[in-house]
Amino acid sequence: MAVSALGSAAGTSASIAADYMKLLVAQLQNQNPLEPMDNAEMTSQLAALSQLEQLEGMSNTFEKVLVAQQFSQAGAMIGREVAIPAEEGEGIESGRVLQVDIIDGKPELVVQVQREVVEDGKLSVVPAYRRVAFEEVQSIGAMLATAAAPALQPGDINGDGVVGIADLVALADNYGKGTAPSE
């Protein structure tokens, strides 16, 4: 087996399982017949490998649920007034969501904003269109309703304001118990 396969942190559980089985077979073939491998040790290694595969499966499922939730939330914004980062400089501007597109597996919104244009010495307001990543968009109503409360992120199960591995652990610890942790 190549050393690079062992050193790679990006391997999938299937490749890790295949590498483990190759190692196990080599270990069994080359073991001392007078001192065979301990059954308890082999069982614990197999159990750890099984847990790794289950955790990776849960992580993939969790990620798919989060993406589906984002798509659903983005679709619900069509026709609504939203706040988006200003195109130039700091601040925000508002506009109406016209459509949602999926770009590289992530939702992006097409937002119609108003632009002031000076033409022939006359000031006029014309519609302009901006493509904005879903994560950058805030519903105006939601901004007003949660002005005093911290923003909750989809998938933030433990309520720490960050979606990460701690949320996956909280999900795994409470899987099948009926409610998410309140902490």
Image (spheres, grey):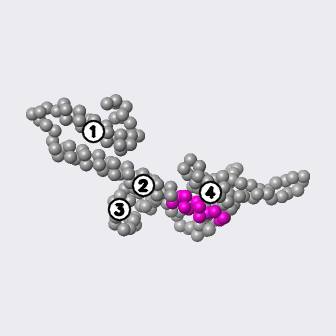
Q: Does 75 lie within the magenta span?
A: yes
Front position among marks 1 and 3: 1
Q: Earlier in the sequence, mark 1 or mark 4?
A: 1
The residue drawn where x is 15% and y is 41% is 38
Q: Which residue is mark 3?
A: 175
Residue 57 % position (x, y) = 38, 51
**Residue type marked 4:** Val
Quadrant position of residue 168: bottom left
For the residues labelled 4 and 2, the Cα–Cα distance comes to 23 Å
**Residue type marked 1:** Met
Q: Which residue is mark 1?
A: 21
Q: How many marks?
A: 4
Q: Find numbered disc 3 in the image and state the secondary structure of the residue it sits on.
A: loop
Q: Find numbered disc 2 in the image and state the secondary structure of the residue it sits on.
A: helix
Q: Which mark is residue 100?
A: 4
Residue 93 seen in the figure: no
For the residues labelled 4 and 3, the Cα–Cα distance comes to 32 Å
The residue drawn where x is 34% and y is 51% is 54
In-front residue for pair 146/70: 70
Residue 17 % position (x, y) = 31, 42
Q: Point out the residue furthest to the left here.
A: 34
On screen, residue 9 versus residue 74, left or right, reads left
The magenta stretch is 69-80
Position of 107 relative to 177 (above/below):
above
Q: Are marks 1 and 4 in contact (CB under 8 Å)?
A: no
Front position among marks 4 and 3: 4
Q: Find numbered disc 1 in the image and state the secondary structure of the residue it sits on.
A: helix
Q: Which residue is mark 2?
A: 61
**Residue type marked 3:** Tyr
Q: Earlier in the sequence, mark 4 or mark 2?
A: 2
